[in-house]
Amino acid sequence: MTDTSILFQSAQLGSLELKNRLAVAPMTRVSATEDGLATQAMADYYAKFARGGFGLIIVEASYVDQKFSQGYHFQPGIATAAQRDAWKVVVDAVHAAGAKICMQLVHAGALNQGRNANYETGAIAPSAFTPKGEMLTFYRGEGGYDTPREITTDELIEIKDSFVSAAVYALEAGFDAIEIHGANGYLLDQFWTAYTNQRTDEYGGNARNRIRLDEEIVKAAIAATQGKIPVGLRLSQSKVNDFEYTWAGGEQDAADIFPVLDEAGVNFIHITEHVATDEVFGSGHSLSGLAKKYSKAPVIVNGGLGDPATAASVIAAGNADVIAQGKSALGNPDWPAKVQAGEPLADFDFGMFSPLADLASQAAWEAAQ
Ligand SMILES: Cc1cc2nc3c(=O)[nH]c(=O)nc-3n(C[C@H](O)[C@H](O)[C@H](O)COP(=O)(O)O)c2cc1C
């Protein structure tokens, strides 16, 4: 049997100590109320991963304002005091089961599939560029995306402020860490990605400019939460609406942006890839390996790492500090406990997301097994 003990060593994300190197990746389950309030069913769902031995649970992307940041119906928010208080129930359940819990903050930008009727309609983005791809049907979407309107300079300040106030709400709700969602095609990734960002101001153009919004949000969120909990940033190449995208500048992009994020004080970087062990840009490194090379921050890595031996080898090779499991955790909410006991793991079954990727569909699927 492969030695996986390295996965069960403690790890440090800034000031936060984790009991092991195993995290649950953020997964949107569109199971909040229409007002974006987290529910008891969500608390039960997240607590299960904590009981199963994960050291850290990164919750699903939660929107930061009552304007354009929500992207999916029944997505949770952390934009109001009521939404903050609803999250406390989830936080307490996860803490009682022995894990740490991280909030993920998102602005949907151009990828708007629907939102609360009291918020704004339409979508805003770095530039008026119609997103590639199609809406996600398991989140009630159908057909192509609408063309967004370009964000004004004043709106950029408002957006930054909304991330900051949501970060403070996360701290008040008792979260142990905050992850800014800069990945997967949403607003911050639209700024980072050259083809969706055609701005001519200091937020568009070269890599330094396109990472500026991430840099400023990370810095402001750390200042507002007074360093009490770590603030990290998730980055990817692939997007929910463009699977094949790769960073335009290759390894040079990594060399350009990670030192900027370090300078902003980022407490961790979370890299997600389809297959996180794949080499990128002919660099001899995986993308998380490049994050380790160019950043001093701890690195969480995610993507196709459900095999315990592979996960352990990524840590052993120094290509990341923490492994995040998405679909493998859904198939095995007790992945850490099973691996430690040497028990076999179950395969993930997409039937769980049918007809919707919500907790009700999952419960119906489980009852039918
Ligand atoms: C149903 C579903 C919802 C997801 N929602 C989010 C999300 O809210 N935020 C995020 O950063 N990634 C999200 N992801 C991406 C996962 O965090 C992860 O990157 C992806 O599943 C690949 O990792 P895996 O191979 O371990 O499953 C989601 C993935 C799935 C399957």
Image (cartoon, helix red, strand yellow):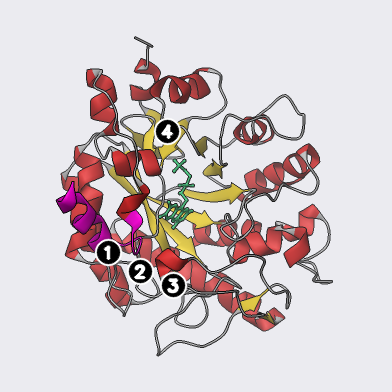
* Label 1 crowd (10 A; few <14 / some 14-19 / many >=20): many
* Label 3 crowd (10 A; few <14 / some 14-19 / many >=20): many
Q: Against 203, is 10 above or below?
A: above
Decide which of tag 4 and tag 3 comes sooner along the chain: 4
Q: Which residue is mark 4?
A: 12
Q: Pointer 1 and pointer 4: residues touching (CB < 8 Å)?
A: no
Q: Pointer 1 and pointer 2: residues touching (CB < 8 Å)?
A: yes
Residue drawn at x 52%, y 24% as measured from the top left = 314
- How far, Cα to Cα, is label 1 from label 3? 18 Å
SS at badge 4:
strand
Q: Which residue is mark 1?
A: 87
Range covered by the magenta-colored residues: 353-369
Q: Is residue 81 left or right of residue 184?
A: left
SS at badge 2:
loop
Task: Name, please, the residue furthest toward the top.
Answer: 1
Q: Amino acid at mark 1?
A: Trp
Question: Which image quarter: residue 308?
Answer: top left
* Tag nearer the camera, 1 or 3: 3
Q: Which residue is mark 3?
A: 72
Place of residue 76 in the rendered image (x, y in percent of width and height, measured from the top left):
35, 69
* Tag nearer the camera, 1 or 4: 1
Q: Main secondary structure of the magenta part?
A: helix
* Tag nearer the camera, 4 or 3: 3
- How far, Cα to Cα, is label 4 from label 2? 28 Å
Which one is in front, 249 or 212? 249
Q: Amino acid at mark 2?
A: Pro
